[in-house]
Each structure stands twice: as C-alpha cells, then as structure tokens.
Image (cartoon, rainbow, N blue to C red):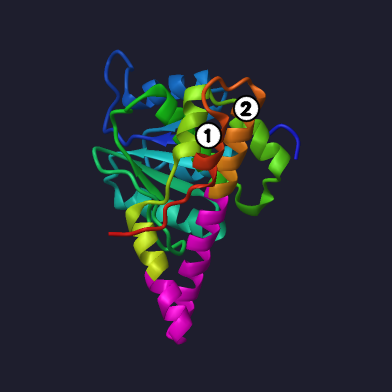
Amino acid sequence: MGNIIPKFLIIQELPELPEDGSTACEAYKLILKALGYESQICHSSQTLPEIMRSFKPNIVLWIRPGSSDAINILQAFRQNDSRLKVIWMDDRPRGRIVGDVSKYFDDFFPSVVPSAEEFQKIVTEWFIDSLDNELDTETLQSFLSLLTPKAQKLVVAEQMWPWEKSRLKVRLEWEQRGHLNEYDRVTLKQLLDTREQLLQRKKLAASILIEQGYSDSIEELIAESNRLDLQWP
C-alpha cells in the first residue's frame, strides 16, 4: 500500500482563543507531530465542513464535545465514510464502541494520558482500525514496528473489553438458537472481526519484539500473544 501517514483532526470548540494561543489542541498537535502523524486544528463548527472536505482526516479527536451543529456535521461525514473514527477526549473510561455508523463516537479517551507508550499504542490502533480491510499484513507490521518496545508489549498483552466479551457471548448464543436479527448479525460480525484483528496485532507485535532481540522469555511472550481471554464475569 505504500507509505501511509495517519491524518488527525483535533476539534476544540472555543468562543475565543486565549491571548497566548495555547489550547489543548496545540498540545495534542505536538504529540501527534512527534509520532510522525499529520494533524489540523478546528475551533469552530462553521469551519468544520471545509476542513473535513479538504484535509480528509482518518481520525477526529474531539475535546469535550458540546455543539450539536458539530455533531450533525460529523454525523453526515460518517454516513458517507464508515471508516471515519471519532474519538471523545474527556475524563471518561476508555472502551471501544461497536455499532453502526449512527453512533456518535467510536471510543472514549481520558484527557490525562497514562503514559507515552499507552498513547502511542492506542493512537496506532485507532489508525489501523480506520483503514478497515485495506491494510495488508506487511503494512500493519510496518506500523507496529514504529512502536517502542514497551508499547509493543502493551499490544501483545491487549485483551477484548469486558463488555465486548459479554456481547460476543450473548450473540453467539442467540446465533445458535436462531434468534439473531439483522442488527445483531452486523454487531456479531464486528465483534468477531475485532477479535481476529486483535489476535493478529498481538502476534505481529510479538514477532517484531523477537526480531529486535527480545531479552525475556520468548516462550512466555508467544503464549501471551496467543492468549485471548474470552471469559466474562
């Protein structure tokens, strides 16, 4: 697929900019630049449509959403491109949202980043997910190779979210009983795809670590890359 650079639009609606020009958008823009990603900033729903059309972001980071105008604009773009990721940046627990494109957000992310490695891992996963089925194994491996060893270990240890496991279990049971409606079939496919993509990332990250001279137990690393705990509470 060639060299693909993730493109992020950072939205923070402000009635007026502070005198020194410093905003949360600027902080995230610096982080994304350090990761080698392209980004633009939007402070008003009035300029949002033109920025979306000209910049064509893969991922929108929306800091503390509030404007219904901006929600409606992004909703229209999502209906035309189901791969567009919209991330709510706020003090909320993070967890993937599986559903159709009528959902406002794909993910929540806390305003305070727990670690540089965690942020790097999650941003990379958002971008990988936004490419959907267009991403071949070689390109995926090239993206994961950009992660630090600590971030790669986080990928290897990644698990499905508890509510994902619960939804998957319920829909698999409904499928066995022949009780799935069309929406449930779509959701089940999305959950199964999420599980397979997660396993693929785990195994690729482990292989990259080994190629880079992983110094701890390789057997334990491989076992962890194959482990996808599907037990639910």
Q: Quadrant of residue 208?
A: top right
Q: Is residue 71 above or below residue 178?
A: above
Task: Identify the amino acid type marked 2.
Answer: Ile
Looking at the rendered structure, the secondary structure element under dot 2 is helix
Residue 52 painted magenta: no
Q: Disc number at residue 221?
A: 1
Task: Identify the amino acid type marked 1.
Answer: Leu
Q: Disc number at residue 210?
A: 2
The residue lying toward the viewer, choosing from 128 and 199, is 199
Main SS, magenta residues: helix
Q: Is residue 28 above or below residue 233?
A: above
Magenta segment boundaries in residue numbering: 170-198
Q: Residue at x 32, y 44 (%)?
A: 94
Q: Is residue 67 visible?
A: yes
Q: Disc number at residue 92?
A: none
Q: Position of residue 70 (x, y in %)?
A: 37, 48
Q: Residue at x 41, y 30 (%)?
A: 118
Q: Residue at x 36, y 24 (%)?
A: 115
Q: Quadrant of residue 177?
A: bottom left
Q: Position of residue 109 (x, y in %)?
A: 34, 39
The residue lying toward the viewer, choosing from 225 and 76, is 225
The residue lying toward the viewer, choosing from 175 and 92, is 175
Number of dots carrying numbers: 2
Q: Position of residue 161 (x, y in %)?
A: 37, 51
Q: Position of residue 44 (x, y in %)?
A: 37, 38
Q: Earlier in the sequence, mark 1 or mark 2?
A: 2
Tag 1–tag 2 contact (CB < 8 Å): yes
